[in-house]
Image: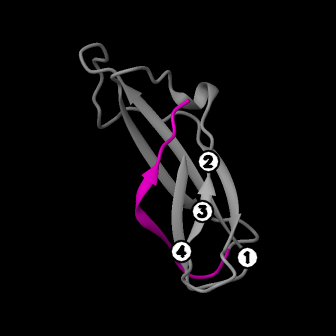
Amino acid sequence: MLIYWYAAAITDAVNWEAAIAAYTVGTDTGSVETKAFAAAISVQTNANANAKAASLTTITISGASLDSAAADDVVMLRITRIAASAEMAGSALLWPFVRVVWA
């Protein structure tokens, strides 16, 4: 999955976390509102050296973090910026889309 973002700051890094929850319509009987997300994957990416220039973070979700996603499942995606010791000051703004590549 590719996350596109930008920031005014040009130093330090941003820590992103992505998690998914797969729901099989017609089979899963629990509430979609309380569906638990699988284990999250965290990635740290340095800010672009140019203020407000696009940055790209690649997150690979595999194994148990896929939440047993299968064909025709509804997959919910949660992207979170997490605090860390080398955290970039200021806001990191997500572009309104994420590119998902399924292999």
The residue at the point 59 percent across, 86 percent down is 51
Which comes before the other along the chain, label 4 or label 1?
Answer: 4
The residue to which callout 2 is attached is: 59
Which comes before the other along the chain, label 2 or label 4?
Answer: 4
The residue to which callout 1 is attached is: 12
Q: Residue 33's image quarter? A: top left
Between the residue at mark 2 and the residue at mark 4, the CA separation in whole angstroms equals: 16 Å
Kindly identify which numbered label has been placed on residue 6.
4
Give the residue type at disc 4. Tyr
Horizontal side, residue 97 vs residue 26: left or right? right
Give the residue type at disc 2. Ile
User: What segment is highlighted magenta in the picture?
Assistant: 88-103
Decide: is 101 above or below 98: above
Tell me if mark 3 has few (under 14), some (14-19) or many (20+) residues whose alpha carbon lies within 10 angstroms of its own: some
Magenta span contains residue 93: yes
Q: Secondary structure beneath disc 3?
A: strand
Q: Nearer the viewer, mark 3 or mark 1?
A: 3
The residue to which callout 3 is attached is: 56
**What x and y, as percent, mark residue 86?**
75, 71
